[in-house]
Image (cartoon, helix red, strand yellow):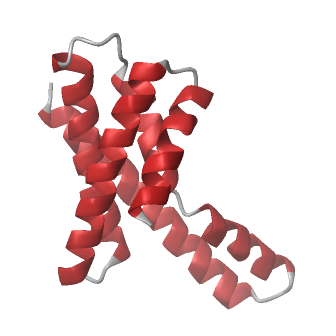
């Protein structure tokens, strides 16, 4: 799972307008962020906490990469590439499908859980950015 996330993140970074250095930074940030979120998941079985922890780590690594490596990189594009493997896109799609087929309770619970995970990703990234300023 970590390998797939690490391989997909650079292409998301390039797709959003980044260069090769942004892509490499996104791969490194995703590798450590995803591995840390899996490590946290062993102890805390709450998906919001693991998403927050992973986002915090890849936010810090993206800032370090953009500031201290000397490569012409942008932290925003590194974060944009690194966050995409964490986004619960399939869960959101299934939630909309459940709502459309009149399974309102399960659809709303899946949608709310997906939105909370997305909020945790944003909060973890924001905390990392605030700490680095």
At a point 53% along the width and 68% down the height, the residue shown is: 114
Q: In this view, does 98 lie to the left or right of 127?
A: right
Q: In this view, does 69 lie above or below 47?
A: above
Tell which of 65 and 53 is nearer to you. 65
Q: Is residue 102 above or below residue 47?
A: below
Residue 107, how many percent across, how many down? 68, 81
Q: Is residue 46 left or right of residue 12?
A: left
Q: In which quarter of the image is the C terminus?
A: top left
Residue 47 in view: yes
Image quadrant where residue 3 sits? bottom left
Q: Is residue 105 left or right of residue 114?
A: right
Q: Is residue 13 left or right of residue 82?
A: right
At a point 39% along the width and 61% down the height, the residue shown is: 2
At a point 77% along the width and 82% down the height, the residue shown is: 98
Residue 86 in view: no
Image quadrant where residue 44 sits? bottom left
């Amino acid at each position: 799972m970590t390998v797939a996330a690490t391989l997909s993140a650079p292409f998301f970074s390039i797709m959003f307008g980044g260069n090769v250095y942004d892509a490499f930074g996104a791969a490194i940030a995703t590798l450590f962020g995803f591995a840390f979120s899996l490590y946290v998941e062993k102890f805390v079985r709450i998906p919001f906490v693991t998403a927050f922890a992973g986002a915090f780590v890849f936010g810090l690594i993206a800032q370090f990469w953009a500031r201290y490596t000397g490569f012409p990189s942008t932290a925003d594009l590194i974060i944009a590439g690194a966050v995409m493997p964490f986004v619960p896109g399939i869960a959101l799609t299934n939630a909309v499908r459940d709502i459309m087929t009149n399974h309102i309770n399960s659809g709303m619970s899946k949608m709310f859980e997906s939105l909370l995970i997305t909020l945790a990703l944003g909060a973890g990234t924001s905390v990392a950015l605030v700490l680095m300023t």
